[in-house]
Image (spheres, rainbow, N blue to C red):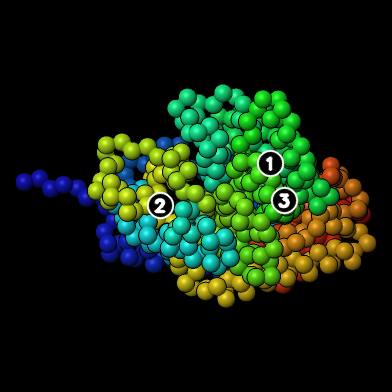
Amino acid sequence: MSTTANFHMSPDEFRRWGHAVVDWIADYQRHVEALPVLSQVQPGEIRAKLPAAPLEHGEAFDAILADIDRLVLPGITHWQSPNFFAYFPANNSGPSILGDLLASGLGVQGMLWATSPACTELETHVLDWLVDMLDLPAKFKSNGPGGGVIQDTASSAVLCAVLAARERATGFASNERGTDGRLTAYASTQAHSSIEKAVKVAGLGRQNLRLIPVDERFAMRADLLARQVADDRAAGLVPCFVGATVGTTSSNALDPVAAIGRFCRENSLWLHVDAAMSGTAALCPEFRFIHDGLELADSYAFNPHKWMFTNFDCDCFYVADRAALIKTLSVLPEYLRNQATESGAVIDYRDWHVQLGRRFRALKLWFVIRHYGVEGLRHHVRRHVELAQEFAGWVRASADFELAAPVPLNLVCFRHRAGDDFNRRLLERINQSGQLYLTHTVLNDRYTLRLCVGQTHTEARHVERAWQLIRQSAEADARS
């Protein structure tokens, strides 16, 4: 009798190499601060070191792991470095990584309640916890007509909101006939690009997205929103969706959600509020002003994977009326029919987003909340805001630098007074040093540097060192 070859990793081998991988991650966390924050490789450099063709025969796992150091690590921009101040954070933590490891080990495909009840019910419960933790409107809890779901990113959340708004505005006819080109959507000039992508994917068309001007704080002007909606209706168009932002990417501006919400409620417009990074701040009662007016929203999203120590990807998306979302997205082929679904007693999250399949993302979020507790999460959020405010104070006191926008939370937008070209060179010099990483934006047509404090292990000494390096780089550029 012939034997069948087995190329699988055995449980004992998995245990051995699993320990090795966890050790590698722990060592990485310990020394990531010493690595250049921004990857120093050139385009194509990583691929040039990889074999041209896949290997015919498998390799020992120690050789594979060794190539992480040799090939992969040089091409990594270290988002987990305490010296990473670019974009918005994508922080993680030990409990989150371990929760994600368990989710991968379980290999759950949680498209239906029936395909793993714990995957669904834990997600529902944790998202209800977060309503209480952030003091969100009770209508977003699952015990009423609304509820929450974990999406991959805020981009997917806004797409679902646009789709639901489209269907509600057309009496759910667009799913059958498509759009007629008359539906319009609205966001501020500072809104995230995901809204533009969403209106294109949803079939509204980029030409039907209206970008509303902002005030001196870079927040949407509700009066100009009202004027644009009235003009569009007079032209025979059908306004259906408004996207408000709590913490814009460029400057952390806070749109006036209450004023926008009242207008949307009076005019039957779907209001979606994107609080991707800044929403986490509402863990702290003193920062909950950011959500003033949220009770008027139809949907809301924030990303624990940005500032709540939960590794990418994890977006919490809430709706006030889950029936509208489910009716928009539900498709039920015969091969998905099952007794639990037919009973109507369970949630099938496949109906809450575009994709069918879904990972057990709630597990890592559950681990984070249980490990830190609300107290621990609040402590770190408050510390990050405190450090950013201290940095802003240094900028205010400087004769060479100036603030470019208000600093409500943990993002500081600033620039050197020497002008755009100087600031471009300054940013390039800073990032090439490898000692920290900043990104830029343009505010009032002026090149602006951004420093966001939000990485898990960023401490006062890292922010102090960043300010020192920024000033030294500026002085060196001025001398050159």
Q: CA distance from mark 2 to mark 3?
A: 37 Å
- Foreground of the two, 477 or 198: 198
Which of label 1 and label 2 is nearer to you? 1
- Foreground of the two, 159 or 16: 159
- Foreground of the two, 222 or 463: 222
Whether residue 196 sits left or right of residue 327 in the image: it is right
Residue 148's spot in the image, x, y percent?
A: 48, 55
Determine if residue 166 is in view. Answer: no
Which residue is tagged 2? 359
Residue furthest toward the front? 266
- What kind of residue is marked 1? Ala
Tell me: residue 57, above or below residue 253: above
Which residue is tagged 3? 259
Q: Residue at x 34, y 60 (%)?
A: 118
Residue 121's spot in the image, x, y percent?
A: 37, 60
Which residue is tagged 1? 187
For disc 3, the neighbor class at 10 Å (few under 14, some 14 to 19, many from 20) is: some
- What kind of residue is marked 3? Ala
- What kind of residue is marked 2? Arg
Determine if residue 157 is in view. Answer: yes
